[in-house]
Image (tube, helix red, strand yellow):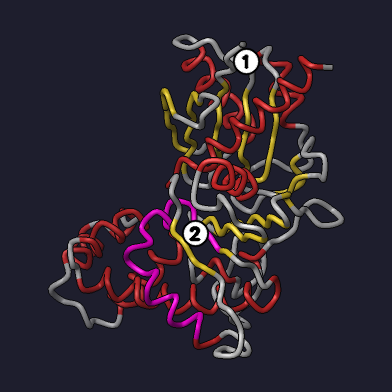
Amino acid sequence: MTTHHTVGIDIGGTSIRAAVVDERGEILDTVRAQTPATAPALEKCLDRLVFDLASRWSVSAVGLAIAGFLTPDCSRVRFSPHLPWREAAVAADMTARIGLPVACEHDANAAAIAERRFGAAAGGRNVVVLAIGTGIGAGLLLDGEIYRGSHGVAPELGHLRVVPSGRLCACGKNGCFERYCSGTALVDNVVELVADGKYPFSQIAREIADDPGSLTGRRVAAGAHDGDPVGLAAFADFAQWLGLGLAMIGDIFDPDLIVLAGGVGASSGLFLDEAREHYGALLTGSGHRRLARIRGTQLGEAAGMIGAAAIARSRVVQVSAS
């Protein structure tokens, strides 16, 4: 039986993570890079990561998990708030450059597929996977199958407007959900809290004073884990917004399971219990209907890579069988 090792690459607005993944969803090797700002630099970076991994492993295909709008057949990236591609034939162009089959998928869909096959969404019937990282992506599984909508972009939950005239979003609108519930939002929450002068004994506050541009969502999470008061306050605010988002998801889709994935989702221990309480209080008809189960990711930040690799593997097998 042929073993298909494939490369899965999760392309986020802040960083790119690539891995060699086997048929069981196990990661065998990883590399990482910062996300370049221009399309040529991004493509060069992706090629380099694949060649690096392929120098150590025999790989048959590459899957890309992309934070952006893709066509229904996933052949083109139409737009991404956090990436430089516009109407780009990413898969075909990369295949021509590296000589390996390349498949693209929305990053949250890739995470949803991975969690369904190997992780927290196993056994779920109608499942929403909310990928919370630099922004928010969402994947919807209906009876186990990805739902894309009529034009390939559903469900774009991160850009639902929750605050009219709120924070400016990279998508061009104001007040989007992801501007209050994401890794970027955590940083904004901390900056606003520190500006109010309420946390003079916070280590994070002192770090901001020394280097205002150094703060990241990952650092806020680490500080909260260590009990930093401003980090904990930022996550308390985050939990309220997440609860609101979960209630919207419940009202719109009525799923039996919601999985929180992505870089921030991997820190669900900091906010999940409180977010569940807000969700239960805000859901329409609460107390007279069943609530969705809400789980943290089992695959962590690797879900996008594992899902992209699985998609690439299935397409290679299909081509081989045809």
Q: Residue drawn at (36%, 76%), measured in percent from left and top?
A: 192
Which percent across, then down, holds residue 49? 50, 22
Magenta segment, which residues? 258-280
Where is residue 210 drawn, in percent x and y? Answer: 20, 59
Classed neighbour count for the residue bearing mark 1: other residues with Cα under 10 Å, few (<14), some (14–19), many (≥20): some
Hey, which quadrant is residue 128 in on the image? bottom right
Q: Residue at x 70, y 75 (%)?
A: 252
- Residue under pointer 2: 260
Q: Amino acid at mark 1?
A: Ser
Write down the residue under mark 1.
Answer: 60
Q: Residues within 10 Å of mark 2 (few under 14, many from 20)?
A: many
Residues at marks 1 and 2 touching, judged by CB atoms closer than 8 Å: no
| 308 is higher (above) or lower (below) than 272 | above
Magenta-drawn stretch contains 271: yes
Can you give x and y, in whole percent of width and height, for residue 59 in the image? 57, 14
Query: 296 or 61, which lies in front?
Result: 296
In the image, is 279 to the left or to the right of 65?
A: left
What residue sits 71% from the left and 61% below the top? Answer: 155
The Cα atoms of the two marked residues, 1 and 2, are separated by 30 Å
Question: Element under label 2?
Answer: strand
Q: Quadrant of the N terminus?
A: top right
Q: Report the residue that reaches farthest toward the left.
A: 201
N-term-proximal mark, 1 vs 2: 1
Near-viewer residue (9 or 164):
9
When asked about the image quadrant of residue 184, the answer is bottom left
Q: Is residue 135 above or below residue 99?
A: below
Relative to 270, 129 lies left or right:
right
Q: Tell whether position 136 is magenta.
A: no
Task: Tell me: residue 155, above or below residue 65.
Answer: below
Three-letter residue code for mark 2: Leu
Q: Quadrant of the C terminus?
A: top right
